[in-house]
Image (cartoon, rainbow, N blue to C red):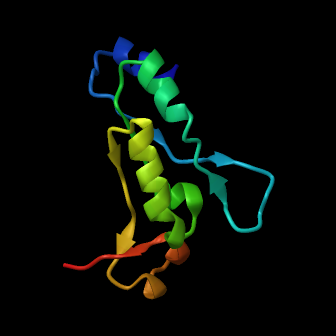
Amino acid sequence: MSAEYILKGGNNNIILCERGIRTSSQEETRNVLDVQAIPYIKKNFRFPIIVVPSLASGKSYMVESMSKASLIAGADGLLIESHINPESSLCDAEQLLICIF
């Protein structure tokens, strides 16, 4: 209901963000991308939704497939974390894609 609270304050510029849900598993993934939340939100709310597949999976090798799944499910956009040299990143190195200029 936070989006409705923001709307009440007069701000109509709202974008929802799916960044994964926490699970009890601590093995390969830190979070799990809730792909079914995307069509649910599209059906029941009027706000656009973006997905952060790199944060949801926590692993760079999963970003491409999670991005495709998100777009097929109806996401309005993606936010993908990148770094020019992920290995030297101060945080989240395992989830970053290489940024090429």
Residue depicted at 69% across the width and 48% down the height:
22
Using residue 19 as the reference point, say whether residue 8 is left or right of it.
left
Q: Where is residue 9 in the image (x, y as percent from the top left)?
A: 34, 16
Using residue 15 as the reference point, say whether residue 60 is left or right of it.
right
Give the image quarter of residue 58. bottom right
Residue depicted at 54% across the width and 75% down the height:
94
Q: Where is residue 7 in the image (x, y as percent from the top left)?
A: 35, 16
**Residue at the far left in the pictured view:** 101
Give the image quarter of residue 49. top left
> Is residue 52 among what the camera can see?
no
> Is residue 1 among what the camera can see?
yes
Vertical placement of residue 50 versus 96, above or below: above
**Residue at the far top in the pictured view:** 8
Residue depicted at 43% across the width and 16% down the height:
4
Using residue 55 as the reference point, say whether residue 8 is left or right of it.
left
Q: Where is residue 11 in the image (x, y as percent from the top left)?
A: 28, 21
Q: How many marks?
A: 0
**Residue at the far front in the pictured view:** 72
Of 65 and 46, the residue lying toward us? 65
Q: Where is residue 82 in the image (x, y as percent from the top left)?
A: 37, 70
Vertical placement of residue 30 versus 92, above or below: above
Vertical placement of residue 31 versus 94, above or below: above
Quadrant containing the C terminus is: bottom left
Of 13 and 40, the residue lying toward us? 40
